[in-house]
Amino acid sequence: MLPINETMGQYSELFMLLAAGTYTVAFIAFAWDLAKSSKTLRAVDLKAAGLAGAAAARVPVAAGVGASSSAGTVDRADGDVAGPVGRAERPTSSVAGGSGGNAAGIGHTADGTMRYAAERRAPARVAVALTVLGAAIHAAGVITRALGAGRVPWGNMYEFLTTGAFVAVAVFLLVLVRRDLRFLGTFVVGLAIIMLVAASVAYWTPVGHLVPALQSYWLIIHVSIAVLSSALFTLTFAMSALQLVQTHRQKTIAAGGADKLGFMRLVPSALSLENLSYRINAIAFVGWTFTLMFGAIWAEKAWGRFWGWDTKEVWTFVIWVVYAGYLHARATRGWTGTRAAWLSIVGYLCVVFNFTIVNQFFNGLHSYSGL
Amino acid sequence: MSERVNEEKKSPAPGATSGGSQPDGASAGKSGTKSGSMSGGSPVAAAKAEAVLPTLGPLGMLRWAWTQLTSMRTALFLLLMLAVGAVPGSLFPQRPANPSIVTQYIKDNPDYGKILDSLQLYDVYSSAWFSAIYILLFISLIGCVVPRAIAHYKAMRSQPPRTPARLSRLPEYGTLVLPAGAGVPASRAIDDAAGLLTKRGYRVDVRDRDGARPSIGAERGFLREVGNLVFHTALIGVLVSVAVGGLFGYSGQRILVEGDTFVNTLVGYDQFTPGSNFQSSQLEPYSVQLDKFQITFDRESQGKIGQPIDFQADVTTRESPDAPARKEVLKVNDPLTLGGTSMYLTGNGYAPVVTIRDGAGNIAMQGPVVAKLQGDNYYSSAVIKVPDAKPDQLAFAGFFLPTAFVTEEGVSFSGDPELFNPQLTLNSYYGDLGLDDGAPQNVFELDVKKLTPLNARNLDAGGITLSPGTSYTLPDGKGTISFGGVKRYIGVDIHHNPGQLYALIFALLAVAGLVTSLYVNRRRVWVRTGTHADGRTMVEYGLLARGEDHRLAGEAAAIRRLLAGAWDLDDDGGSQSAPSGGADNNRADTTRPGASAGASADVGQASPDHPAADFIQSTAGSSESKKEQ
Ligand code: HEM
């Protein structure tokens, strides 16, 4: 067991604060990007409306469920676009791409495939750069914490929160390399700020040794996968929530209603959101399956039984079953789209509940929260 | 899912199966009704058809019930029920884990405690309703997996589906044109394509090779469904393994003071919980002696000084009474494995060693007294029962403090977990302990109702306070107690679970199946070739995915690249890794607009009733869509 290095611990706390500060500026930049792009898009739309009359109003949502009528004659694949509602063959990338292409034409920040569009969004670039900087400082915070304690930095609530926030931001940035998910920036960075503040204010714990129950290499395997999966679930939660809003908005617009949620123009169509969140959820589900299994193996090593319905085990199981339900819903007639999105949201709420309430208020063998 | 299974059953012809997957339009017309049941051409109509109660006999009713139970919707519903059903087990104390807390909970909540009990909310995971949910789920699962496995076995042995009339209607579509001088006639082109697809892992079927319009149907990714079936079947395996563990396993507890030896026989346990099919002959008589138990306490983390950070039990084990002795170390997270069981370190504490002489001057009791942890820094309670004392039975109850401090108000507490100032403070009693009638008693509790106090703080004699090496003489010549020293004890759990290994194996199988089914894509490719009047060879291809497949466009591009490479075509479309949909759907058209658009039109003109009409269709379609964009 390595000795405690308090100085490192203090550096770590400083880094965490600096990271939170940087994130706050990044958050403002992301919000600015939303506001600005929304305005630009509005102007584009107004111009388009002037040119093409009422038809233009429907263009921004052409990628969506409600759009099959208008786009159907154009895009062969639109027969599939018409469902997530009741289909065995789920849409493939060409569907999202093909119809997303329509929307990209008028300046969606993220098109159906969520690839980067040509136009430059200065505030968004600033925001991403700041997030990268914040994440770098944050990484330094996590690493100095690990060095200070001489072990992996996830052994109590403070460390779960600080490391978890880092992983969430890092996963977000990694996905950003391939996909333009900058519209999620305010959400992810905002969440990271909340987690860092909560860690520092409510759960602050000085660097220290692990209790013997946690001294196991399974801590490294089990918890890291759990945190990683949770970070992915965080992304899909945000996307599913946006999907619900977007579905509502698309329906309103398709029915000829006014578009009251202008900023949602920045967000891809509901179908694109659904498809990408499904893919991320599938990865996260595999991760969660491993979390569950490794947890069981560890429980066997530590307590002599691999499954005992301890509160933490119960909730890990519940989360697993909810997301299994989500995967099923995507293949069940009448359960795709909105209902599946709700399952994804419920699943994430269970993840949050498992982490916050269960860790603190439920007595169980997992009383390691360090409170 | 049963929908899907039935669908496949109804349409044994491989071609027809694909009908359900036709995106829309003319080709779907042929199989429209079938696809309706699956892809939900009209979900409302389908739902209505499902909702109509059949006016069939009892057998029909059974069939109907079975169909309902094994439907995907029911599976989803049961899954969600399972999630909801598991929750109460985390809200209320559970008997299997904590029987005494449940009893206390019912006492504390007289208004609803009993009601909850009658709803089995303290035994959620063995309750009738929870069992009903998961048993139904697993019946549904079996009813699901078996027909699907059969259907899939058939699908794997049948040919890829017939080539659709209009490939251009598939989600991924493209054309290639070979110049007349290339020397690749339609039949060779189809052979080349077949070779390439075979190499790429497709199962390929060439049709009408020497006809005017040869084509191939190709399919790959059967492992996807296999993975799914393995996953679901393995879940059954996990459940069965857990059940086996419950039936044939056992578990028990034992407290070992330094120097004690545990022998794995029924009497060796302090507490023993057999599985329902347990036989005591299962126990292998190994032995474990606790030589020494060491604890390291944290002396450097702020706020956590005095917390244990390492436990280590040095033990001597013997596999059988006459096997050689072995030195081993038992730690938290690092159990001992012996005789098919595992032994876990689950608790520890101090055991003051006392010697008690009775009124007659004989040693009535001598040895360590296991003190039960009560508070911080190993503040522990001690109970000593001395039924052998004469003329009166004696009893002591009080506290053991490893580092005793006393506040000004006279409250004593322990200042440190280490033995810096060990102290035993006791009250003493005499009378009938009630042990003679053989009724079991909790060794950690003393019922003083029928006893007469001898020593207590509120009596004239006062309480007893002992430090190591000191003795105390009880009032009225009842005897003496001396405190010799302190040993440590550990609590160990011993478990045997024969299902465990199988559960692990099935869980690993499940994960393998899951990953396979999520990341293997089931795809179909069709290629059709034809010779143009001017001698050029026209090639068109289309791709279709079964199930979620976001890499279909990439696959189309890869196949295009391979074909173009095989025929030395200068086709930059293929190098585009993931094209946007518009370009993708008719790559030849967009990348080499002049050549192929013209060519396709020519084909149509040259032979208007030729199947190549497809070419025109697609070309027209795509140029239209380009305009639109
Ligand atoms: C113990 C309960 C069950 C669990 C935990 C479970 C879990 C899952 C998961 C995680 C998937 C997605 C991964 C994959 O495709 O392999 C899946 C897919 C599937 N499950 Fe289950 N399942 C259960 C019961 C059932 C039952 C009872 C049925 C039949 C009614 C069923 C039918 C299916 C089908 C058809 C798919 C493939 C869906 C697709 O095409 O994506 N499952 N299941």
Image: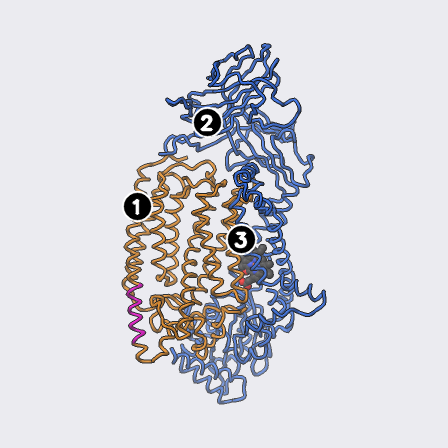
Chain colours: A orange, B blue
- What crowding class fits label 1: few (fewer than 14 Cα within 10 Å), some (14-19), or many (20 or more)? many
Q: Which amino acid does label 3 sit on?
A: Val
Q: Are marks 2 and 1 on the same chain?
A: no
Residue stretch in magenta: A34-46
Q: What residue type is labelled 1?
A: Phe
Q: Which residue is drawn at 56% across and 45% down?
A: B116
Q: Position of residue A264 (x, y in %)?
A: 36, 66
Q: Image quadrant of residue A248?
A: bottom left
Quadrant for ligand 1 reads: bottom right
Considering the numbered disc 3 on the image, is that residue within a helix, a strand or a loop? helix
- What crowding class fits label 3: few (fewer than 14 Cα within 10 Å), some (14-19), or many (20 or more)? some
- What crowding class fits label 2: few (fewer than 14 Cα within 10 Å), some (14-19), or many (20 or more)? many
Q: Does the magenta stretch include residue B486?
A: no
Residue of label 2: B379
Q: Quadrant of the N terminus of chain A?
A: top left
Q: Image quadrant of residue A331?
A: bottom right
Which of discs 3 and 1 lies nearer the camera? The answer is 3
Q: Position of residue B170 (x, y in %)?
A: 51, 75
Q: Which residue is drawn at 42% across and 20% down?
A: B421
Residue of label 1: A15
Q: Can residue B104 be seen in this view?
A: yes
Chain for mark 1?
Answer: A
| Separation of marks 3 and 2 at Cα, in angstroms | 41 Å
Q: Position of residue B463 (x, y in %)?
A: 48, 17
Relative to residue B493, is residue B210 depicted above or below?
below
What secondary structure characterizes most of the magenta part? helix
Considering the numbered disc 2 on the image, is that residue within a helix, a strand or a loop? loop
Residue of label 3: B84
Q: Image quadrant of residue B273?
A: top right
Relative to residue A218, is residue A102 depicted above or below?
below
| Separation of marks 3 and 1 at Cα, in angstroms | 41 Å
